[in-house]
Amino acid sequence: MMISIRGEHLEVTEALRDYVEKKLNRLDRYFEAPLTSDVQVKLSVVKDLQTIEVAIPLTGVLLRAEERNSDMYASIDLVVDKLERQIRKHKTRTNRKIREEGGKRDLFKMETSPVTFVEEEEDFELVRNKRFDLKPMDVEEAILQMNLVGHSFFVFSNMDTDSVNVVYKRNDGKYGLIEPAIYK
């Protein structure tokens, strides 16, 4: 597994690099063949929280996890646990689909000892449906409205583009805008 580690507002020491590589190399046991793509790791410090972001591109899926903690080593442990859960979930779904389609070779290693996996199926339960009128406004007014209602995002009709947009508050305290791409 090729691991690319970069630091943002943080010096990546040799000890930190070794710890990240050691922990992420534990994930190799889940794959039949070695990964051909680079695993991207970003270590950073945001508001006194040690943050790690890991992206593992696989065929047809991107495994991505992010963790924040006051201790970088704890963040690394937590992100690896999260990635293991994602891999097991993806492995279960992929192998089930392959068995249903007629027994192509498994993409993931099968355990040789009897291990019971609790299938981590997510139930997406819709608990509330909300309708509201979209008042045409500009981005600045939408940010003001979002802050006024105390939400982390706000849906509005952008008067400049005549499309539905979303403004949101980012983790760094700044704001983001989501606009639909118009294909013709």
Image: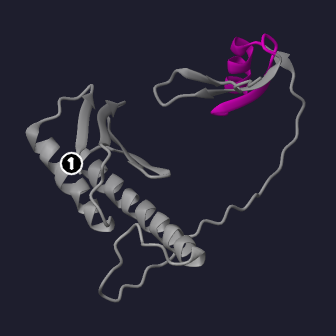
Q: Label 1: which residue?
A: 20
Extent of the magenta region: 138-161
Q: Residue at x 84, y 44 (%)?
A: 130
Q: Quick check: 46 above or below 76?
A: above
Q: Residue at x 31, y 67 (%)?
A: 32
Q: Position of residue 165 (x, y in %)?
A: 73, 25
Q: Position of residue 153 (x, y in %)?
A: 66, 32
> Viewer-proximal residue, 61 or 14?
61
**Residue 97 location, quadrant:** bottom right
**Residue 137 location, quadrant:** top right
Residue 48 in view: no
For this orientation, the residue located farthest to the left is 14
Q: Quick check: 50 above or below 166?
A: below
Q: Quick one: quadrant of the C terminus?
A: top right
> Viewer-proximal residue, 178 or 154?
178
Q: Residues within 10 Å of mark 1 (few under 14, many from 20)?
A: many
Q: Tell me if 91 is positioned left or right of 54 in this view.
A: right
- Identified by mark 1, the residue type is Val
Q: Position of residue 81 (x, y in %)?
A: 35, 60
Residue 3 magenta-highlighted: no
